[in-house]
Image (tube, rainbow, N blue to C red):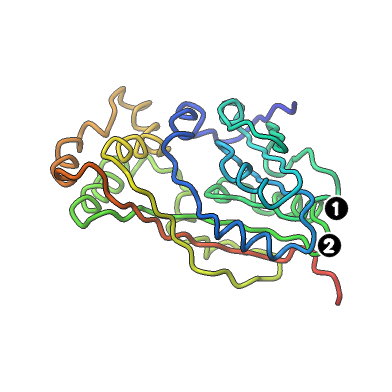
């Protein structure tokens, strides 16, 4: 197993919580991505985190390799038949040349060295291989809950967001992709959450963890009562995340 070094690791300390509280992507997204691939032998989920994308891809691809630079994330990733996990930087994968049908990066591209990663993508992709990257911003619950979370995001932990977060806020529009664009459909994640789920999710944010490291205090405590009041008496609420998807032909063959 390759040991990854020299990367910005904002998620190892909360890897177990990450696997519990992060939202899941809709099955329709994976179906659409699979439909783009002439062959479905091998998929690579880069920056796999808890492995949710890698596991989902096994329903559409023969074998899936999930890589992540965080050894802790790989340790907590979901084990599943036909999924192999490796600790590796995004631009130093263990994959063979011209071997991959689909490459996915979910909510993680902004951490990469783009040029180096795109070179790696070109190296490992088959002719007509597909690259799909996506990101999502703040969730939507109710106006009162959203206002409190926005205050937490901007005013309490705002200075602790890494600079790379700007790419999410810009929906990856500022990233120059050197590949042929495939128009992607609109996508929304939706979950039914309890108040506990919301609090747990805020704890997976990298800025929350950096605040704790800086102050020795959990910043969620500063909004807990306000957020509880905003939540009200409902046991559960519907939570939605608009997802931005960017999809590309990597090495299109001539027809």
Camera-side residue: 76 or 81? Answer: 81
How far apart are the alpha carbons under marks 2 and 1?
7 Å
Instruction: Please identify the residue farthest to the top as the structure is shown.
Output: 216
Q: Identify the residue shown where x is 18% and y is 53%.
A: 144
* Residue density around tag 1, few if under 14, some if 14–19, many if 20 or more, within 10 Å: some
Looking at the image, residue 238 sits to the left or right of residue 27; the answer is left
Residue 98 marker: 1
When asked about the image quadrant of residue 101, the answer is bottom right
x and y, in percent, of residue 103 in the image: 69, 52
Q: Which of disc 1 and disc 2 is earlier in sequence?
A: 1
Q: Are circles 2 and 1 on residues that touch, CB within 8 Å?
A: yes
Relative to 250, 196 lies left or right: left
- What element does badge 2 sit on? strand
Q: How many marks?
A: 2
Pick the residue in front: 248 or 151: 248
Considering depth in this image, is 109 or 45 the residue closer to the camera? 45
Please name the residue shown 53% across and 63% down the image.
Answer: 174
Please state the horizontal and vertical placement of residue 170, each as a whole percent of the image: 45, 61
Count residues near mark 2 (Cα–Cα under 10 Å), then give few for <14, some for 14-19, many for 20+: some
Residue 117 badge: none
Residue 215: percent from left, percent from top: 30, 26
Q: Residue at x 74, y 62 (%)?
A: 37
Task: Classify 77 as above or below 155.
Answer: above
SS of the residue under disc 1:
loop
Quadrant location of the N terminus?
top right
Q: Quadrant of the C terminus?
A: bottom right
Residue assigned mark 2: 127
Give me the residue at 28% from left, 40% from top: 194
Q: Position of residue 10 (x, y in %)?
A: 49, 34
State left or right for residue 111 relative to residue 122: left
């Amino acid at each position: 197993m390759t040991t990854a070094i020299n990367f910005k690791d904002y998620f190892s300390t909360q890897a177990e919580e990450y696997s519990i509280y992060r939202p899941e992507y809709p099955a329709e997204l994976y179906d659409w991505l699979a439909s783009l691939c002439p062959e479905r032998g091998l998929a690579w989920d880069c920056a796999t985190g808890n492995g949710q994308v890698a596991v989902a891809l096994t329903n559409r691809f023969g074998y899936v390799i999930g890589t992540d630079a965080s050894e802790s994330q790989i340790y907590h990733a979901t084990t599943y038949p036909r999924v192999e996990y490796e600790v590796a930087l995004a631009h130093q994968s263990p994959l063979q040349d011209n071997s991959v049908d689909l490459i996915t990066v979910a909510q993680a591209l902004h951490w990469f060295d783009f040029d180096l990663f795109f070179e790696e993508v070109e190296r490992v992709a088959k002719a007509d291989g597909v690259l799909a990257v996506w990101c999502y911003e703040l969730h939507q619950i109710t106006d009162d809950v959203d206002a409190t979370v926005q205050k937490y995001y901007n005013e309490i932990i705002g200075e602790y967001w890494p600079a790379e977060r700007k790419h999410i806020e810009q929906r990856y529009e500022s990233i120059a992709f050197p590949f042929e664009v495939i128009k992607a459909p609109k996508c929304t994640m939706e979950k039914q959450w309890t108040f506990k789920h919301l609090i747990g999710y805020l704890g997976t944010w990298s800025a929350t963890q950096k605040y704790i490291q800086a102050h020795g205090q959990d910043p969620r405590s500063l909004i807990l009562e306000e957020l509880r009041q905003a939540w009200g008496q409902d046991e559960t609420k519907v939570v939605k995340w608009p997802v931005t998807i960017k999809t590309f032909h990597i090495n299109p063959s001539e027809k």
